[in-house]
Image (cartoon, helix red, strand yellow):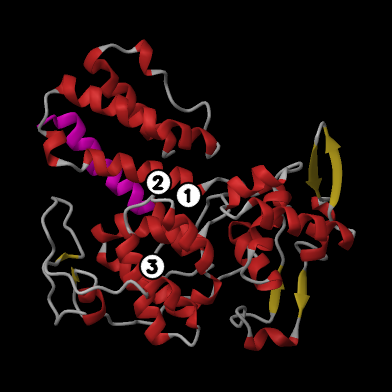
Amino acid sequence: MNQLLKNFRDEYLDLLLSFLWRQWSAIGVSGYGDDKDKWIIDPEALLIFTCTIGRYDPRLFDEVLDWLDTNGRFINIQRLKTIVSLNLFTGDKIISAMAALMAERSKFIKWNKLAQNRMNPDTSESLFIQKDMKPMPAFRSPDDIFLHYGYVRGKIVFRHHTRPVHTLHNTALIFRLRALLGVNARSEVFAYLLTHESGHPRRIAQETFYAQKTIQDLLVDSVHSGLVFVRPAGKEKHYWIKSDEWFHFFAVNAGKPVKSEWTKNSVFAESKTIRLPKEPFEHAQWINWPLLLSALEQVWLKINNKKFLDSAPLLQSSELRILMQEIKPRIQAAGFAHVLSDDAFFLGENYITVFLSDMKILLG
């Protein structure tokens, strides 16, 4: 086994789990330090990515279930279905099991749309996996819902430690917009416009994973509000907003305490003083998370393959080049165009070291 790749596999998994803990903790999951990331969180991409990587951390996985039990109303099921249907990720069966669990516990019937493909497979596998690739045994009686989808795990116990999403953080901008505008395409569209100078409907549709006509119709209607503007760019029309005016709309007297009686029964019940964000939206970074996280998942599936790890270095290098040809466009389109090296400059097995270096840089 190539020890360099074996060591990187372990390090890579730790980095991915740390990333997941930071992201989920920033939107209410209990059990991790403060989030210092500036990225706008994409809950649908985060959830489907967790279905693969979260299998290596049962505590994280169950904290996410706890989060869904508390904050699941903010999940856009239709958008999640669209992302799943593109086959960018491999956790579709686990997403269906989660949805079936939420459909039983929630008053929202929307979860049934993802849980309709319930199955009774002839074989099953352990849901959780140890870091040495061995199945993790279940210590309690199996959970019936996950068993229906072919996964063995202990009975789920909800701890109810999850906090409601703190929507005043810029990383939670999508949640703030969904709370105001509804769980629909408008939230992603305005999050995109708040973090970009302008946008064309086709481009915004690609970035937000909605149909282009949906985005087109939404933007045309929004111009009548007086808060969205349109300008010609050749044969196209680009839409834009004055983000500073939106910032004041969302956060009047930014940075100053605002007294409010309603806070006692709100997500800010820990204090009667709301401290509004000090930074405008341009400090929040937009990333096409479905493209980036699906690329990172493909890297994990490759380096977590025992047959690949046991291969000769020259074959490993060749397979990594092929993998990078597939995922490089996703990484670049996600907003990381200048991170990856050109493999043509590195002959033979020398590319392995370059690949590992690129991945470490990408993960920060």
Secondary structure of the residue carrying numbered label 2: helix
Cα separation, mark 1 vs mark 2, equals 6 Å
Residue 290 badge: 1
- In the rendered structure, the answer to whether residue 12 lies left or right of residue 326 reads left
Amino acid type for the residue under numbered disc 1: Pro
Query: Which residue lies under the disc numbered 2?
Result: 294
Q: Viewed as shown, does residue 310 lie left or right of 287?
A: left
Judge depth for marks 2 and 3 and give the one in front: 2
Circle 2/circle 3 CB separation < 8 Å: no
Query: Which mark, residue 31?
Result: 3
Per the rendered image, the range of residues in magenta is: 1-18
Q: Any magenta on residue 5?
A: yes
Q: Is residue 32 magenta?
A: no
Q: Disc 1 on helix, strand or loop?
A: helix
Q: Residues within 10 Å of mark 2 (few under 14, many from 20)?
A: many
Q: How many marks?
A: 3
Dominant secondary structure of the residues highlighted in magenta in the image: helix
- Residue 111 image point, x, y percent: 45, 76
Q: Quadrant of residue 9?
A: top left
Q: Is residue 210 above or below residue 325?
A: below
Counting from the top left corner in percent of width and height, residue 72 is at 49, 75
Q: Residue at x 24, y 39 (%)?
A: 302
Asked if 42 appears above or below 59 in the picture, the reply is above
Categorize mark 3 by other alpha carbons within 10 Å: few (<14), some (14-19), many (20+): some
